[in-house]
Amino acid sequence: MADADESTGATGRRSKVARLIDEYDLDGIGAEMERRWTAPDDERTSLRDLATVFNQRLLAAAMAAAGLQPLAGEVENTYQLLTDEETSSADRTQTRRQLERDGVPVEELQSDFVTYQAIRSYLTEHRGAEYTADDRDRTVVEAENVQRLRGRVETVTEEKLDRLRRNTEFDLGEFMLFVDVSVLCEDCGQRYGIDELLERGGCDCATSTS
């Protein structure tokens, strides 16, 4: 993980992404991208998506510097109009002209947009991040993913119930919450708890009907 000073990386060279982070005051985005890229498979953000996120942050910063206050979703929509191949030339030109009238240096901004290769170089060479694919058995990996998601459901549900008890006339004493996930095989009618199904490696219906 990189130090707080992100001006130069492990190679001693100043990367384009690191330079833009400084120029646009995007504090914390380096650590955020590293965390999202190295997250478990079910939570991981791809390099292409990270490049889009980074470029949208550049656009948002440029709009803010021009005194604009974009509404929710406006930055994402504007970025799509500027970069999406399916955007008509008329719509793209109109978007560019509107930004220029608002004081956004569009040509300079678009030259600052980065590719996913630049994001990869920044993360691996500058921050020293590594992504290692999980080569364990997929059943084991997905069992952990299901357990993690079930834990989230339990936590969020408990918080919602506690809030209802405190702030409304919702009547509920001290409680215990159980989050159970069951799977019904429609071929044979067998029902399993998700943990049991994953542990046994699937349903027995294929064996019993062979």
Image (spheres, rainbow, N blue to C red):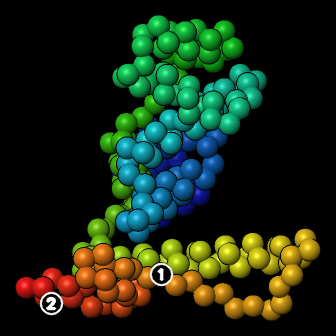
Report the residue at 37% width, 86% height from top: 191
**Looking at the image, is 94 positioned above or below residue 50?**
above
How many residues crowd around disc 2 within 10 Å: few (fewer than 14), some, or many (20 or more)? few
* SS assignment at label 1: loop
- Quarter of the image containing the C terminus? bottom left
Residue 169 visible in the displayed image: yes
The type of residue carrying mark 1 is Val
Report the residue at 41% width, 25% height from top: 84
**Looking at the image, is 179 positioned above or below residue 87?**
below
Q: Is residue 167 left or right of residue 140?
A: right
Report the residue at 50% width, 42% height from top: 53
| Residue 159 pos. (x, y %) | 74, 75
Which residue lies under the disc numbered 2? Answer: 208
Quadrant of the image occupied by residue 131: bottom left
Marks 2, 1: nearer the viewer: 2
Dots 2, 1 in contact, CB < 8 A: no
| Residue 134 pos. (x, y %) | 29, 73
